[in-house]
């Protein structure tokens, strides 16, 4: 009897030796004359346990981690092909508390299936959403997405259905669907995990979007630092074309949809939707003035839906299960789930998909296990390098767009970066200015000049010279950037700067006192 063994092909697992582990298992099985079938799946998201090897047994999939190639001989000797005990044995994968306590909707298949196997995708409810969409009018699909409460998962949290409705109602011979997969925020990797671990769900979501608004061409603009994502997507797209899920007359219907992958320009600002469009058109990635909105005049001047990977990858389950099913998760106006990425000084870094409403404290300690250093967590930055720093007093805040807004903070792409009590927040504020100065497209003065001056002023504060005047100047610069920048790069750089100053004044040489949230 042939035993099936799962070894991840996700970039995180590869960086930790997953390919070597897979090769070692194959060689050891051959040496022992034991038939095995090695399936390269996506990552389950428990990065501290990668490479995580799973063995299919009568009782279910049994997990072993963190496996190295040096462990393979002892694993075979211990009987791991039968799920027997070993120092690395973790138990049945589905019963691990990290996974059992999540609500995996968008990530329902990631880590479970072979990402480039269409049959595996179909066997796990894949393309059910598309089949449902093909029975509906475009306006009905848009209404389903609207009723689900899905909001953009790329940062701005704009209602997805409203964006689609605008493009649907726009009059044009050609419309486009563009996926923003230029995942550049620090501490974020959920887009990459979908592209590498379940690419068909993104393809399906984009195809449904095309049918909904009358677009026939789609582009996935993938971060240039993601070669494995690009390779996996291209393999899946080729299979989808060959099987009738892309191209002319999708599944025998009247709908056409063509899809291509485009490698991004390697600039953070190209994650901003209008700079992305400029880059996609072959131009330098500069931010466009708005209006007109991309939904009216986007790629090549045509009506364009631009959504993040997670937004588009969530559409198939909404179409399959219904808008009410998805809307029943979450709280307030934040409906459904959010793939949360734990990074930084954290013991158990990885991906957690939870319904909105879970608190930062639960994520940091129940899932993250506290800091990797064992020291108290002093601050977390949520929402990438432009997100605010939150102190321990705000760790009980539920993940909800409006609740975070009350704290002058953002959820963004769901990335959470933890810092223990050895961090100097003045240096982190300086880094925010420096990041903006490096990544600015240079089109608007507040961002281009304000960030550069900000670095210079922060150097004075850190050096302890002209502190009072310099802090006042930082606040003035932040006000100018916040209100005068053309896009969120300059407009949100004040978030990390001012939150660090407000919540951690002692790191700026000021006497600590109570500050409003």
Image (spheres, helix red, strand yellow):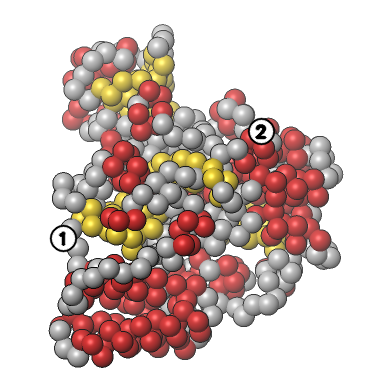
- The image shows residue 66 at horizontal and vertical percentages of 25, 33
10 Å neighbourhood of mark 2: few (<14), some, or many (≥20)?
Answer: few
Say which label, 1 or 2, has the lower sequence index: 2
- Residue 450 is left or right of residue 105, and the answer is left
Q: Which residue is denoted by mark 1 in the rendering?
A: 422
Question: Where does the C terminus fall, quadrant-wise?
Answer: bottom left
Q: Secondary structure at mark 1?
A: loop
Real-space Cα separation, disc 1 to disc 2, in angstroms: 47 Å
- Residue 456 is left or right of residue 236, and the answer is left
- The image shows residue 113 at horizontal and vertical percentages of 49, 30
Query: Looking at the rendering, which quadrant does residue 288 occupy?
Result: bottom right
Frontmost residue, 336 versus 294: 336
Query: Looking at the rendering, which quadrant does residue 276 occupy?
Result: bottom right
Q: Secondary structure at mark 2?
A: helix
- The image shows residue 145 at horizontal and vertical percentages of 69, 47
Image point (25%, 82%), residue name: 458
- Relative to 113, say whether 158 is above or below: below
- Relative to 302, say whether 397 is above or below: above
- Relative to 504, say whether 475 is above or below: below
Residue 472, can we see it? yes
10 Å neighbourhood of mark 1: few (<14), some, or many (≥20)?
Answer: few
Question: Where does the N terminus fall, quadrant-wise?
Answer: top left
Q: Which residue is denoted by mark 2 in the rendering?
A: 321
Image point (41%, 41%), residue name: 352
- The image shows residue 304 at horizontal and vertical percentages of 70, 63
């Amino acid at each position: 009897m042939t035993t099936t063994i799962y070894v991840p092909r996700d970039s995180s697992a590869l960086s930790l030796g997953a390919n070597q582990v897979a090769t070692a298992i194959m060689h050891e099985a051959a040496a022992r004359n034991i038939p095995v079938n090695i399936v390269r799946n996506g990552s389950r998201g428990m990065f501290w346990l990668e490479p995580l090897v799973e063995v299919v047994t009568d009782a279910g999939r049994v997990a072993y981690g963190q496996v190295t190639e040096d462990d393979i001989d002892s694993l075979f000797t211990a009987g791991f092909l039968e799920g027997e005990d070993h120092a690395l044995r973790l138990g049945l994968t589905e019963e691990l508390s990290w996974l059992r306590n999540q609500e995996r909707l968008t990530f329902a298949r990631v880590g479970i299936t072979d990402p480039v196997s269409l049959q595996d995708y179909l066997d796990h409810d894949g393309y059910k959403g598309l089949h449902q969409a093909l029975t509906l009018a475009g306006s009905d699909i848009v209404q389903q997405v609207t009723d689900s409460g899905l909001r953009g998962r790329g940062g701005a949290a704009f209602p997805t259905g409203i964006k689609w409705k605008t493009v649907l109602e726009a009059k044009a011979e050609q419309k486009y669907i563009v996926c923003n997969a230029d995942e550049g925020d620090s501490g974020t990797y959920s887009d990459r995990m979908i592209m590498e671990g379940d690419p068909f769900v993104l393809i399906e979501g984009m195809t449904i979007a095309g049918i909904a608004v009358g677009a026939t061409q789609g582009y996935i603009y993938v971060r240039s630092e993601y070669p494995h994502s690009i390779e996996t997507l291209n393999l899946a797209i080729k299979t989808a074309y060959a099987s009738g899920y892309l191209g002319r007359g999708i599944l025998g219907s009247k709908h056409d949809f063509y899809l291509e992958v485009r490698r991004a320009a390697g600039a953070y600002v190209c994650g901003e939707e209008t700079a992305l469009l400029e880059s996609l058109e072959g131009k330098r990635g500069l931010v466009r003035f708005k209006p007109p909105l991309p939904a009216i005049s986007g790629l090549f001047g045509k009506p364009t839906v631009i959504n993040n990977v997670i937004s588009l990858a969530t559409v198939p389950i909404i179409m399959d299960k219904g808008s009410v099913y998805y809307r029943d998760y979450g709280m307030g106006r934040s409906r459904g789930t959010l793939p949360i990425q734990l990074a930084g000084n954290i013991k158990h870094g990885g991906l957690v998909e939870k319904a909105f409403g879970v608190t930062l404290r639960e994520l940091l300690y129940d899932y993250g296990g506290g800091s990797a250093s064992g020291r108290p967590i002093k601050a977390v930055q949520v929402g990438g390098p432009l997100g605010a720093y939150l102190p321990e007093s705000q760790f009980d805040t539920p993940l909800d767009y409006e609740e975070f807004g009350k704290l002058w903070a953002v959820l963004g792409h769901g990335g959470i970066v933890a810092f223990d009590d050895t961090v100097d927040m003045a240096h982190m504020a300086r880094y925010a200015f420096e990041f903006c100065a490096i990544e600015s497209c240079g089109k608007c003065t507040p961002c281009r000049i304000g960030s550069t001056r900000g670095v210079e002023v922060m150097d004075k504060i850190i050096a302890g010279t002209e502190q009072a005047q310099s802090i006042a100047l930082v606040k003035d610069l932040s006000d100018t950037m916040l209100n005068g920048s053309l896009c969120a790069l300059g407009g949100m750089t004040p978030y990390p700067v001012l939150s660090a100053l407000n919540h951690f004044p002692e790191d700026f040489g000021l006497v600590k006192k109570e500050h409003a949230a």
